[in-house]
Amino acid sequence: MRLAVLASGEGSNFQALLDARAAGHLDVDFVGVFCNRPAARVLQRARDAGVPAIGLDPRHSATRAGFDERLFSRIEDVQPDLIVCAGYMRLIGADQVDRYDGRMLNIHPSLLPAHPGLDTHARAISAGDRRHGASVHYVIPALDAGPVIAQAQVPVLPGDDADALARRVRSREHPLLVACVRLVSQGRIAKHGSAVRFDGRTLAEPLQLDHDEELHSP
Ligand code: GRF
């Protein structure tokens, strides 16, 4: 499977995918890392791993749609089977999303449908949530609203601030993303309309990441 990654910053989720592949746990080819911040660390991680690294600055495009067209024409050049948004902090226009329907995943740091958008950790604490976590979902034009494949849950502990909670979530994001990409690359997960199919059966609820780092039906 030819995998393209979109990211904006640190790239720890991308690194988790790289490490899983190096360890023989993920059978994918990284065909490019695409980033809207040319100085982001994720691009250096890609270069260090010998993966084509493309940083494009949105300020060089007159419009949002123009930037998306520029970005996605570079993505099209590498002919990905799957695009993974791993910390890509920019909205993608519906034209591009629709072209990759069923072939684009996003990892979001909340238990969707709770807390779409930004500042999810602070919002989970303010809401008094007892559980928080991360979701991997198919991308659709509406923000953080596509069918959810799987989630990893963590407790919200007394005294947590947003940073402490973010660190707890981040440590589960990595195995969650690896496990989801593995199942998709094996053809075991697919989008069917607004539903997710796992081994040919429609999921009534997202899969859950267990302590063995595998995904199970709840
Ligand atoms: C992750 O928490 C991701 O869920 C969020 O942005 C963060 C990116 O982290 N949307 P990294 O760049 O993968 O380290």
Image (tube, rainbow, N blue to C red):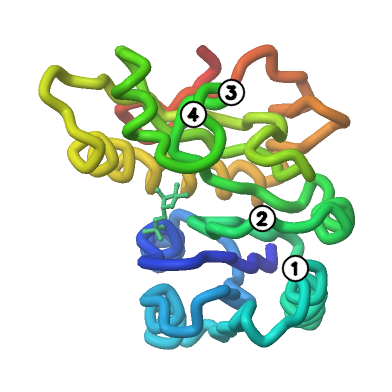
Q: Amino acid at mark 3?
A: Pro
Residue 213 image-quadrant placement: top left
Q: Are marks 4 and 1 in contact (CB under 8 Å)?
A: no
In the displayed structure, 64 sits above or below 200; it is below
User: What residue is at 58 percent from the left and 23 percent from the top?
Assistant: 113
Q: Nearer the viewer, mark 2 or mark 1?
A: 1
Residue flagged by tag 1: what amino acid is it?
Answer: Arg
Reading the chain from its start, which is encountered first: label 3 or label 4? 3
Separation of disc 3 and disc 4 at Cα? 11 Å
> What residue is rendered at 79% in x and 82% in y?
77
Residue type indicated by callout 4: Gln
Pointers 2 and 1 in contact (C-beta within 8 Å): yes
Element on which disc 2 rests: loop
The residue where tag 3 is placed is 113
Mark 3 and 4 residues: CB-CB less than 8 Å, in contact?
no
Find residue 44 and report its horizontal and vertical position in percent: 39, 83
Q: CA distance from mark 2 to mark 4?
A: 22 Å
Bin the neighbour count of mark 4 within 10 Å (Cα to Cα): few under 14, some 14-19, many 20 and up. Answer: many
Circle number at residue 151: 4
Residue 64 numbered mark, or none:
1
Q: Secondary structure at mark 4?
A: strand
N-terminal-most mark, 3 or 2: 2
Residue 40: image x %, image y %? Answer: 41, 77
| Label 1, residues with CA under 10 Å away: few <14, some 14-19, many ≥20 | some
Residue 18 vs 144, above or below: the answer is: below
Q: Given the image, on which type of amino acid does mark 2 rest?
A: Leu
Q: Is mark 3 within 8 Å of ligand 1?
A: no
Q: CA distance from mark 4 to mark 1?
A: 31 Å
Q: CA gap, disc 2 to disc 1?
A: 9 Å
Disc 2: which residue: 91
